[in-house]
Amino acid sequence: MEKELESESLTLFENENIEKTEAIKVKNTLFTILNGERVDLEIEEIFDSNRFYEIKAVTFSADESFLNKYLTPFKSVDLVIGIQDVDVQVRGLKALENETKNLIESQKAIIKKKQIHFFENLSRENQENIVEEKWKLRVPISSTIHSKFYLLKNDSETRLIFGSANLSFQAFSNKRNQFENIVIFDNSPLFSQFEEYFNEITLTCTDFITKAIRKKAKSKIKVLDENNDEKKEEKFSV
């Protein structure tokens, strides 16, 4: 009887020549709702800098090239990147034994390298925007922020965008193999609620590009200007 039961058991790999099914092709991987209707929008239309001049954004991660292309035209950019500042995070390790000293120093070196790398990958214009504090980049001190929402406005209109998409080509492009969704509301009462939420989040954050980096970059800009070299390179290294 046991042998009969064993013979009835199934295996998913009985046939070595399994037929391959044709992959389903999806028209758009970014599912977009605008004011209650499903739409297909280009990234320039979503982050419409011709219509709006200010953006406040919360994203788990950010692609510098995406910021350069789509956020540069905004007059004011206030961006929170949700991944913790490791340099701040390791301060808690100081309460531990001296054996953690090397770990602390290595983590500080890592975050400093990330800050400089991020800054150097921005366009020259956006590097100066950070130095002049037209752009604010922040990271959380003691938590991780996984929210993604974007607040655009001008003198009379607002746009609220929220969903799963980070500020990256991977998330907002329909040509990438990654499913994302966003909901957009223009001139919605929800905007003020999300703006209050944004202000609450910023209270838990610190500058990502530190004062020391900004100071060094400012002095570099001054030297370039004095030598009339400011137009010779799109961006500079710190």
Image (cartoon, rainbow, N blue to C red):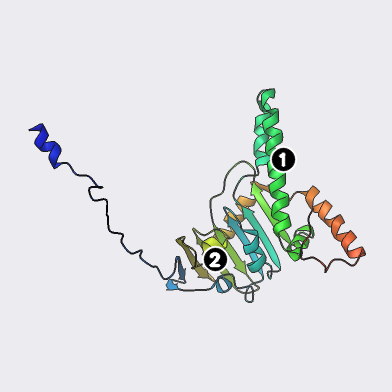
Nearer to me, 54 or 11: 11
Q: Residues within 10 Å of mark 2 (few under 14, many from 20)?
A: many
Query: Where is residue 160 drawn, in percent x and y?
Result: 54, 66
Q: Residue furthest left?
A: 1
- Left or right of 37? Residue 191 is right
Q: Residue 174, relative to residue 89: is it above or below?
A: below
Query: Where is residue 122 drawn, in percent x and y?
Result: 71, 60
Q: Residue furthest bottom?
A: 50
- Left or right of 199? Residue 32 is left
Quadrant, the N terminus: top left
Q: Residues within 10 Å of mark 1 (few under 14, many from 20)?
A: some
Residue 224 visible to the viewer = yes
Q: Nearer the viewer, mark 1 or mark 2?
A: 1
Query: Where is residue 7 drawn, in percent x and y?
Result: 13, 39
> In whole angstroms, how far apart are the C-alphas of marks 1 and 2?
37 Å
CB-based contact (under 8 Å), mark 1 and mark 2: no
Nearer to me, 14 or 181: 14
Q: Which residue is depicted at the point 84% across and 56% down?
A: 218
Q: Which residue is depicted at the point 85% across and 57% down?
A: 220
First in residue order: circle 1 vs circle 2: 1
Q: Residue 212, relative to residue 154: is it above or below?
A: above
Query: Where is residue 198 drawn, in percent x and y?
Result: 60, 55
Q: Which residue is depicted at the point 41% across and 71% down?
A: 27
Kind of residue indicated by mark 1: Ala
Name the residue beneath numbered marker 1: 109
Q: Which residue is depicted at the point 50% across and 73% down?
A: 41
Name the residue beneath numbered marker 2: 160
Dot 2 falls on a residue whose secondary structure is strand
Q: Residue furthest front?
A: 17
